[in-house]
Amino acid sequence: MRMWMVDPRWMCSKHLLGEHVECHMFLGSLLKAKTLDGFIDKGLLEFKSLKGRHDALVSEMVARGMNHQSPLPESPLIGSIKILESTVNREKSEQELLNRCVRCQQKHQLFIKKD
């Protein structure tokens, strides 16, 4: 489970949809009081950005003609400081995604050329 926290416009569909599902899994784990310490310690999750990130992923899904039918439920008040302070290193995450996925690399290059 991870949040890539990169621009969704250059993510391949596999990673775009995968991160969307993982947003739901992250919230589901929180609601079930499962520990997420390992993911947080590795910088893979950023709770404070969960809703905004989900919405950004959905916007890109809709822009690509995908049918989104899974709104993110309202999150409960979370008392864990560790969860609230968790962050994703965006530069490191971007490099890892680009190293993993040729399709994301290609879309990233096209996206950079447009700017």
Image (spheres, grey):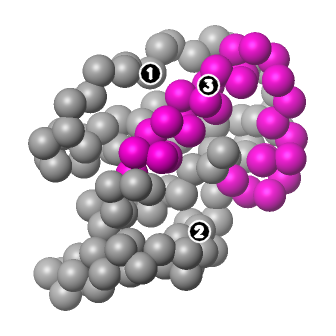
Using the numbered discs, state the Cα–Cα distance from disc 1 to disc 3 in whole angstroms: 8 Å
Residue placed at 13% from the left, 42% from the top? 65
Mark linked to residue 72: 1
Q: Would you say residue 106 sits in the magenta stretch? A: no
Nearer to me, 46 or 26: 26
| Direction from residue 49 to residue 39 in the image, left or right | right
Query: In the rendering, at what x and y percent does residue 70 appear?
Result: 37, 21
Q: What amino acid is labelled 1 in the image?
A: Leu
Query: In the rendering, at what x and y percent does residue 63 appear?
Result: 14, 46
Instruction: Say which residue label 3 marks.
Output: 27
Using the numbered discs, state the Cα–Cα distance from disc 2 to disc 3 in whole angstroms: 20 Å
Query: In the rendering, at what x and y percent does residue 29 appear?
Result: 71, 24
Assess whether mark 3 and mark 1 are in contact (beta carbons under 8 angstroms): yes
Residue placed at 44% from the left, 40% from the top? 20
Q: Compare marks 2 and 1 and give the one earlier in the sequence.
A: 1
SS of the residue under disc 1: loop
SS of the residue under disc 3: helix
Tell me, yes or no, if residue 91 can be seen here. Answer: no
The region drawn magenta spans: 16-44
User: Is most of the magenta stretch helix, strand or loop?
Assistant: helix
Query: In the rendering, at what x and y percent does residue 11 appear?
Result: 36, 63
| Direction from residue 68 to residue 88 in the image, left or right | right
Residue placed at 55% from the left, 81% from the top? 99
Instruction: Say which residue label 2 marks.
Output: 93
Q: Would you say residue 37 sits in the magenta stretch? A: yes
SS of the residue under disc 2: helix
Dot 3: few (<14), some (14–19), or many (≥20) neighbours within 10 Å? some
| Direction from residue 44 to residue 100 in the image, left or right | left
Residue placed at 50% from the left, 13% from the top? 74
Q: What amino acid is labelled 2 in the image?
A: Ser
